[in-house]
Amino acid sequence: MNVEHEGSVHVLQLFDVSKRIGGREIVRQLNMSVRAGEVYGFLGPNGAGKTTTIRMIVGLIRPTRGAIRVCGHDVERDPVNAKRHLGAIVENPEMYGYLTGRQNLLHYARLAGVDHIEARIERVAKRVGLEDRIDEKVKRYSLGMRQRLGVAQALIADPKLLVLDEPTNGLDPAGIREFRELVRALAAEGLAVFVSSHLLSEVEQMCDRVAVLQQGRVIAEASVAELRARAGSLLLRVSRWDEAASWLRARGFDVEGKDGRLVVARLDDARVASLLRDLVAAGFDVYEAARTGGLEQSFLALTGAESGGDTR
Amino acid sequence: MRLWRVVQNEWMKLVRRRRLAVVVALALCLVGMFALGEHHERQIYSRVPTQAEVSADWRASAQANLRAAEAQLRLLKDSSANSAGAAQTLAELQQNVQEDRYRLARDVAPLSPNLLDGWSETSQFVGVATKTFIPLLVVILVGDMVAGEMTQGTIKLLVVRPVRRRTLLLGKWLVSAASAAALSFLLCFAFLGVALAIDGPQGAMQPEWLNIHVRFFTQPGALQATPVAVYNHAVVWPMWQAFLLQSALVAGAMVAVASIAFTCSVLFPSAMVSTSAAMGSIIIGFVVSAMARGQSWVRMLFTTHLSLYGDLAGGTSFTIGSPVTLAQGVAVLLAWTAVLLAASFLRFGRQDILNA
Ligand SMILES: Nc1ncnc2c1ncn2[C@@H]1O[C@H](COP(=O)(O)OP(=O)(O)O)[C@@H](O)[C@H]1O
Ligand SMILES: [Mg+2]
């Protein structure tokens, strides 16, 4: 097997990774792989084992069984080469409060073996929008600024893989949107991003692929676009709504109507298109049509009744 | 290369932490206390009626003394000193001979008796401080080197870097050891500076005995063995030179203390617990080595050898009631340091970092 070749395609690979702590199996037989340029969501309720998995990826704890490779290098056996391409935030990005933002970044840049440290610090500080406050002590930073500094330290070594553990925790909506855009931009530049979350909506907006973790097992893995296309409801506002409802019911659609709005359940892309075409052809005026809950429903279908709950 | 970068980082963190300010403030308090004590002693001395000045022709009397002592020594040579009393007599004669020879060879007059000697005052104070205050300062300075990062959670972003854990730990230890050595060395000279400012600069050339062995004589009827300093292999150094050596030995002993505190900071994940554990082990070790006087295993405790200069100048043997040498003291401290550091490297290298 050509490890180098494989490494160039898959930036992160987990092979049958299990972790047992104090006789309890926290994480069981994970198999995942993340490609360059891909944002990979790791979705699971609190306590599912997301942080434990991420700690194994970044080398804070060792897997009981299995192997993890970053860019083809085994994290346990060749930690220096594996971590050379890695940037990470594990839970909260705790930094040295008594140092300035710049000193913190200098500290991490030295350890990462970065050349031209000053220029690199300027660049990542600008990238996360911290260039004005970079010379202030970190203990005076707001939560949002700390998160930005956390991203900056993860980017300091120009990594190929970014591992983020619930990075939007504690951010306000504007901050979350900004963060999402940053992650998408990084992926567009070719980074692989592995991001955990307990929020389905976040994964839906940020990720290309998603694995669902439940009690330490990956119970499903799929591409987000595929899931979105697969099923969902259609929300309609049409003329003569009660008439339209019975017209649709007669054609076998699952329709509910209320106050001039219709909700048609369980439709994929093809059926939505044909429904709209037929509706217009039958002389109804369509004022508004919106897909909702696509991902969520496919999700429930995919993962069975046990999921849901916290992952919404 | 990576190690050097780790050292740079650790140094940057050490000098910017509040702990350093606390340690410096405490050290200044200590220097102030010593200054007050010296000032007080000087006032007492100034109230004592003036004693006879050292006569100008001290050389003549020294030469006469030397000849008399040498003659007596020649007489004693044949009878071996096998009782405490005889050994004492022999030791005093030898000491007199060595002192007079030193004074005559180097032209060092005895100090006037009503002058305080800042050099020997400092040397004595440092001998006490190196067993008590200075180790506590060192523990405060480096007692949370690793535990602090565990408590704060900053260890996570340190361990995810492309640096081996043992390199991180070695860098941290190097900085702890170097800062402990620098702190104690500078502190010794701060004491000296204060003492010389108060008492005056005299005394730098006065004789100081090193490499004194101590023999213990068990006498019928006596409960404890009687210690007698033996000057057979003793060397006489000028005080300033001996003080330099003493400061270096204090710095060396504090590297051992820093290593103990460092190990505590690896073994205990909380900064509070690790600092207390290190402080506790030093205080308990100190108490044990004082209480178990005369037991030979006391020599194996690290707290016994915190004053390595005492090992060399005989003071430690008198304190613990059994003979020790500098070589033994250094060996004991090195052994403790090596064993504890091995434990911390083993532990940190394979530890799962779960709770940070
Ligand atoms: N130090 C620990 N010792 C034992 N069990 C732990 C420890 N840390 C976490 N766990 C357990 O591991 C499981 C997964 O935790 P975690 O990975 O933090 O979940 P998540 O990040 O998905 O919320 C939880 O059930 C938790 O109780
Ligand atoms: Mg978590």
Image (tube, coloured by chain):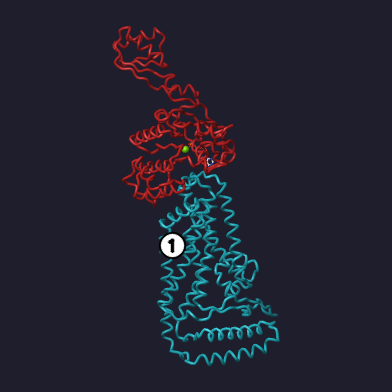
Q: Residue at x 30, y 13 (%)?
A: A286
Q: Residue at x 54, y 65 (%)?
A: B253
Q: Nearer the viewer, residue A231 or B293?
A: A231
Quadrant assignment, res A73:
top right
Chain identity for the colour cyan used in the image:
B
SS category of the residue bearing label 1: helix
Q: x and y percent of residue B270 in the render?
A: 49, 51
Q: x and y percent of residue A4 in the render?
A: 54, 35
Q: Looking at the picture, does residue A28 appear above or below residue B226? A: above
Q: Looking at the picture, does residue A13 appear above or below residue A95? A: above
Kindly identify which residue carries mark 1. Answer: B23
Q: Nearer the viewer, residue B241 or A59?
A: B241
Q: x and y percent of residue A312 in the render?
A: 43, 28
Q: Amino acid at mark 1?
A: Val
Q: x and y percent of residue B335 in the render?
A: 61, 61
Apparent side of residue B165 relative to residue A89 in the rendered image (left or right):
right
Image quadrant holding the N terminus of chain A, namely: top right
Quadrant assignment, res B288:
bottom right
